[in-house]
Image (spheres, rainbow, N blue to C red):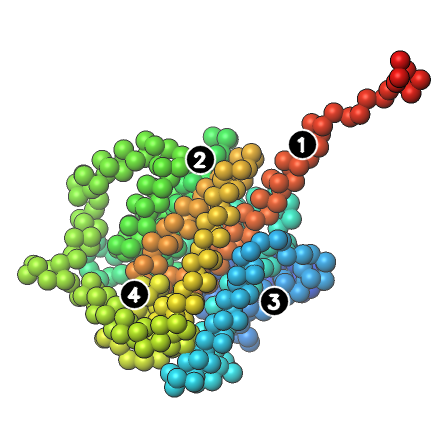
Amino acid sequence: MGLGLGHFIPLFVYLAFWVMCVVSLAGRPKLGLYYLIPFLPYRTLRDHFLVFPLGANILTILAICVLIGAFLQGKRIPKSKLYTIWLVYAIYLYLSMWVGTAMGNAPAPLWDTDVNFATWKAYMLIPLIFTAAGMLIDDRKSVRIIIILTALSVLLIDRSSLMESMSRTWTNFDEDKRSGGPLGYGANQTAAYLAQFAMFFWGFAQFLKRKKLKLISYAIVGLTVWATMFTFSRAAYLAVLVGVFVLGLLKDRKLIVILGVFLLTWQTIVPVPVRERVTMTKNANGQLETSAEQRVELWHGAEQSFMRSPIVGNGYATYQMKEHLDDLRDTHNWYVKVLVETGIVGFMIILVLLQQLLAVSFRLFRKATDPMYRGLGLGLFLALCSSIVANMFGDRWTYIEITAPIFVLTAAAIRALEFTSLEATSQETASVPAPSQTNPYLAYR
């Protein structure tokens, strides 16, 4: 607006966080949850809070206030195996850190100054937000608001990502030009977020009846796919392609044909730098390029580490504490990382968690009669499929910015399943004919 107020926006947003903490504790926790959602992925904006008191913890503080406010209002946690799985997993991960301590791989997880404990605490913000959302999403209106706020946050990330990408000249691919993105952790993390939410709104749009809303949803999809393309993340490209294939199988078979045509002609369609990025798996000498070669070597080292303690692993959050190839702190595959750190036990818990997530979303897609609920179910299923693929190329799961919004939508899906079941029960009750009023004097005639 040219008023020079842009410098004060972080301060206004930060102060509003504290206002929402008070509002949540004073009996309106749902407003605190709504305020929280758009800021979950926008890490670079939240980084401006670091200069303010407790700025680094303001997201956690608001989430706790929302949860306390929900308890004070007598809200209940919905019936879902996912909440039990998260509780078991949280406890297991904490015990796993002590396993790492016993093996000499990490310090005792007691304080924020201990890297492993700080990592665990940050990760646990995801189930905390999931629980708060599950308690407060209690009607169809709140489900709709959650989806609208998710769309708003995706548009904010799209805008920021595209502004960074389009500020550079892309006649050819240049690794040095890739930005950290609005999530603040690098282009690959931003790409994973964009890929999963491009697929969410693509699936959601399938059941929208109003033409205006359908066009808005498809516009979000187009903008998000465009932003994904200029993150130059091959994992995100694959995640989108898999998501489109699944969407074709479940809803629109024409997409499978279109996908086949695209795979045959993509080199003539996509921009030159994208084509260069995709085809640089091997260099001119036929050898693996640096990124692919690093992954292979990291996975080989991870295999050796896993074999030293295959059942319970080497301790949660310990991989980052040791030296690896090129000083990397990640296995470039989340599933491998889970196996190395938490062993087969931790990996099995994760498989059950993912299975339940897919089951909730797919069940809603199949059972719901409300178009919004069906779209939520299908969109969430597609987003999860994309996330599963993206995590094969790095840890995209433990980041609040990427995964917490998915679990907010999952909380909405769990509630939508409840509403669907209640509606079905009500309809069955209404369809039972009332007992006829028989004249007792004529009953035996």
Q: What residue does disc 1 label?
A: 428
Element on which disc 3 rests: helix
Tell me how far mark 3 sits from mark 2, CA to CA: 36 Å
Amino acid type, mark 3: Ile
Tell me how far mark 4 sits from mark 1, CA to CA: 51 Å
Amino acid type, mark 1: Glu
Q: What residue does disc 3 label?
A: 64
Amino acid type, mark 2: Gln
- Left or right: 12 with respect to 358? right
Element on which disc 1 rests: helix
Tell me how far mark 4 sits from mark 3, CA to CA: 32 Å
Image point 56% across, 49% down: which residue?
Answer: 414
Amino acid type, mark 4: His
Question: Badge 4: how crowded within 10 Å, few (<14), some, or many (20+)?
Answer: many
Is residue 347 positioned above or below 320 on the image? above
Q: Are marks 1 and 2 in contact (CB under 8 Å)?
A: no
Residue 91 can be seen, yes or no? yes
Q: What residue does disc 4 label?
A: 332
Tell me how far mark 3 sits from mark 1, CA to CA: 40 Å
Which circle, 3 or 1, is nearer the viewer? Answer: 1
- Left or right: 53 with respect to 403? right
Question: Badge 3: how crowded within 10 Å, few (<14), some, or many (20+)?
Answer: some
Position of the C terminus by quadrant:
top right
Tell me how far mark 4 sits from mark 2, CA to CA: 34 Å
Q: What residue does disc 2 label?
A: 206
Chain-order first, disc 4 or disc 1: 4
Element on which disc 2 rests: loop
